[in-house]
């Protein structure tokens, strides 16, 4: 007795295995029927989970579940409006995520006094732009602001002269700074 999509899938597989060895009456039709029931019940389960996710305002998970409902039912047809809803909630969660990161970066910029704070803001602006990148242009002006604050957060070291010693100092400082940045992950 099947009670969920996994049960129907298991029954379909068992029927398929059986008709490879036995040509028993309607075993092939039973395998196909159970496969179709799997598609239907799995789509219903994913769709119901997605609707629950929407109620909980978990839009990212809702988009994933609507997309799963669409994909699992695709061999039969389109499942309700699952593809459309997946796109709607995908854009919604990306917009919310981008806005959160953008606002965090703005908050940091308003209070920033240290180079590391500018680098952190640049990272958040860049993340906001990245999360929204599948919708064309950068989120608001996040890409431009990421570049601006990345430059503001750069450490600048000046060594005068063109002699061998000055070149050696520049090289040593650059190497040590790169090692330091790798360790502290400041960029």
Image (cartoon, rainbow, N blue to C red):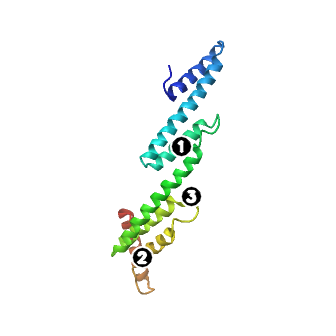
Tell me residue 80's x, y (percent).
Answer: 59, 40
Give how far apart the Cα atoms at labels 3 and 2 are.
Answer: 28 Å
| Image disc number at residue 134 | 3
Q: Nearer the viewer, residue 139 or 19?
A: 139
Q: What residue is drawn where x is 47% and y is 65%? A: 126
Q: What residue is drawn where x is 43% and y is 49%? A: 57
Q: Residue 178: in sight, yes or no?
A: no
Residue labelled with disc 1: 66
Q: Residue 58: in sight, yes or no?
A: yes
Is residue 132 shown left or right of residue 123? right
Tell me residue 178's x, y (percent).
Answer: 41, 68
Is label 2 in a helix, a strand or a loop? Answer: helix
Other-residue count near label 2 (Cα within 10 Å), few / some / many at <14 / 14–19 / ≥20:
some
- What is the quadrant of the C terminus in the image? bottom left
Residue labelled with disc 2: 152
- Answer yes or no: do the residues labelled 1 and 3 have beta carbons within 8 Å? no
Is label 3 in a helix, a strand or a loop? Answer: helix
Give how far apart the Cα atoms at labels 1 and 2 are.
Answer: 42 Å
Mark closest to the chain's N terminus, 1 or 3: 1
């Amino acid at each position: 007795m099947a009670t969920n999509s996994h049960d129907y899938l298991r029954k379909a597989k068992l029927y398929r295995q059986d008709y490879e060895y036995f040509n028993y009456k309607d075993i092939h039709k039973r395998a196909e029927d159970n496969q179709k029931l799997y598609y239907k019940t799995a789509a219903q389960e994913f769709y119901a989970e997605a609707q629950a996710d929407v109620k909980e305002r978990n839009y990212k998970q809702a988009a994933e579940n609507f997309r799963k409902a669409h994909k699992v039912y695709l061999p039969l047809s389109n499942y309700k409006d699952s593809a459309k809803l997946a796109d709607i909630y995908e854009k919604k969660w990306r917009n919310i995520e981008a806005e959160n990161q953008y606002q965090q970066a703005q908050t940091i910029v308003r209070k920033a006094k240290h180079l590391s704070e500018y680098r952190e803001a640049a990272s958040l602006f860049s993340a906001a732009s990245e999360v929204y990148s599948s919708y064309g242009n950068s989120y608001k002006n996040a890409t431009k602001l990421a570049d601006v604050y990345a430059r503001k957060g750069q450490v600048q070291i000046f060594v005068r002269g063109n002699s061998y010693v000055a070149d050696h100092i520049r090289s040593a400082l650059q190497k040590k700074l790169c090692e330091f940045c790798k360790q502290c992950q400041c960029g």
